[in-house]
Image (tube, grey):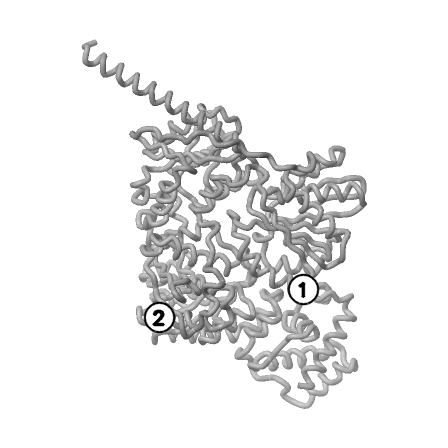
Amino acid sequence: MPTECYDSVMTLIETTSFYNSGLSALMDKLLVRAQQMQHRHMVVLAGDVGWCRDMGVQLVALSRLSRVTWVSSEQQQGTDVVSIGMAKKLLGQERDAIVFDAHSGFDPDAFGAVSGVVCGGGLLILLCPPLAQWENINDPAAERIAIWPYNTEDISGRFLRRIARVISASPEAVTVIEQDAALPVVPMSAKAQDSADIPDDVFRTNDQRAAVAAIEHVLHGHRRRPLVLVADRGRGKTAALGIAAARLLQTQTIRIVVTAPRLSAVQPLFQQAQKILPEASVREGCVQWGDASIQFIAPDVLCLSAVSADLVLVDEAAAIPATLLQQLLTRYSRLVFSTTTHGYEGTGRGFAVRFRQTLDKQTPGWNQITLHTPVRWAENDPLEKRVFKMLLLDAASANDEQVGTATVDNVVMEKISRDVLVNNETLLAQVFGLLVVAHYRTRPNDLRNLLDGPGLSVYVSRYQGQVVATALVATEGGFDTQIAEAVFAGQRRPRGHLMPQSLMVHAGLKDAAGLHCARVMRIAVHPVLQQKGLGRQLLKYIKDDAKKQGADLFGASFGATESLLYFWAHENILPVRMGFRRGHASGEYSVMVLAALSAAGEKVYAAARARFKRDLPQWLADPLQMLDVAVSAVLLQGTDVVEMALADQHDLDMLLGFSKGERTYEDALAPVWRLLIATGKKPTGSFSNIEHRVLFTKVLQKQSWVNVARRFGLTGKAEVLTHLRNGVRQLLDR
């Protein structure tokens, strides 16, 4: 071998050996520091895909950690690999290290989910393109927000640019190893974390002990005083449910029912119960201790069945539809609701704000406990802080004191550029924070959509620079003839474009295909400023702007509630379509509201509205049997039903006789139906008290005697009939 070639080879070997030696020393320092502090650490490997994956394998080997899972679309020989789409299956489990392969796609929901799986002293290793180039590289995970006619290449890189910026700005919390660059310097190990004073082997923290005591008090204390457990991930709240349940079984023969979005979400609960009751009979979703038991029942099954329970434990309540939670609250007198404050599956903050109103109304004696101290890692964990920052899990709206004096007369409204938004952390946090608090469920991917979603516009109302209201609006429609024919025939469903596709497919309005629509996806007002006209003011501003931009139709789709229907109706934006299945997040039936902004839009709107008004009474009697009575009454106002109400004296005689008990329900049914339709059509029509709601549910929604009795807590047909007679008498007296 020539001397110069030999020297080059030796130099390469020495350089590689030196690099590997340095890498080994770096990993040793990181792990010693992490394990002394019981903190988790993030390591970012930034480079091309082959280098990143090879380095990931090397780092895992150097770490000597045993419980390691890769989240990737590529299989790694001899390793545990989970696809990004299946990352949720890791929830409730623990790992020493997670390798997240962003070359397979940076899915914010999956990344947030697996970050909580890493234990104290462990690592989250992120593989990604070079940070400076990441925003320009096609990301497979962007497909989730790529509506027609866009694909992943068309998605802007604002979200990834911000992720790279947050990583680069955190050298104390994130170790970045870049391809073809020198290894970073790791700070010296900090002082080891003092362990908390834990009462005994059962409890991991004092917070957990207090939570268990509070759960036990729900069973032993006054009825109708539910408990709400609130915590960030990793605080041991699910385990606390299991500890309390097992301790209660040791002392009493009771039945405890556990419910959650999935059985896998409450595995820690059953694991804790089994530890405390090692001789119990165990099968999937059930622990039997003599005649006492802890049993899992899915939320929808629990609400539809007549299951008896001495105590009901509801875990991950923010991920359960609100209507199901309300039914549980009505049916059971001893409940514990547990929710994650900043969750991968939907933040608990929007849930907390909205469900608190329900608790105040139905069970004003409810209590809340917050678990602060982490169980699986020590306090002030750098990985938790960094993930929160990356995904804005702790985004907050402006302080109450800063905005308390805002009114419709002193705010400034504008459409803001998303390029401005991504470069202004305070503005971004306030906008996203408002959207989080005002809506039932917000996921990390919603942040990506906010920054990168095609065809979206962001509007804000500001008071002295602080965001007091915001809205996210999607531009939809404009299908060409070929796409329109395929959609109308049910052959294609282009991603996105909810409003025109719904009008075409469900309302049968083919002319909607070529129209341009502006759909309000979200609108939110600061909690301390609601009911002061700011939302309606911003909505009118957006509607006027949409008209200037050439939109034909303006509207929204949302879970139908009485207050929301009145909010949109104030701007003459009225219902044109109902969904016939409850939304998974809100638990409400969806409604589409619409207003015309052009002559072409008016033609489609008029046809959609006419069909809605004509068909609603039939829907109430079949697919919308379970629709809330108050919502049904609002929808019924202005419907076009053949005028048959109290056409002659015979109807009045039959109604009067029924109210006195002189006529049977079957004989008076038709006149009672006409009376209810006539009442509901009036703008002042109301079905506010229980007698009216029973009437509406039985006569218009055609529910069985058994279901009506169960829905309103009545003893049976006889008591339902008494309410029907009293309700008719009240309506006749108006």
Point 70% across, 39% down: residue: 273
Q: Where is residue 240 in the image (x, y as percent from the top left)?
A: 66, 43
Residue at the disc numbered 1: 362
- Residue 590, given in percent of the width and then of the height, sits at 52, 63
Cβ–Cβ below 8 Å for labels 2 and 1?
Answer: no
Q: Give the answer, above or below, for where 53 lies relative to 629.
A: above
Q: In which quarter of the image is residue 173?
A: top left
Q: In which quarter of the image is residue 622?
A: bottom right
Query: Could you classify mark 1 by the number of other residues whose Cα lies within 10 Å: few (under 14), some (14-19), or many (20 or more)?
Result: some
Circle 2: element type: loop
Q: In which quarter of the image is the N terminus?
A: top left
* Mark in front: 2 vs 1: 1
**Residue at 38% in and 27% down:** 54
Residue 122 location, x and y as percent?
A: 50, 32
Q: Earlier in the sequence, mark 2 or mark 1?
A: 1
Secondary element under disc 1, as helix, strand or loop, is: helix
Q: Mark 2 points at which residue?
A: 552
Q: Can residue 26 be seen by looking at this rendering?
A: yes
- The circle on residue 595 is none
Which residue type does callout 1 highlight? Answer: Gln
Specify the amino acid type for callout 2. Asp
Question: Which quadrant is home to the C terminus?
Answer: bottom right
* Residue at 67 percent of width and 58 percent of height: 366
**On the picture, is 300 further left or further right than 615?**
right
Q: Is residue 638 left or right of residue 246?
A: left
Q: Who is closer to the viewer here, 692 or 489?
A: 692
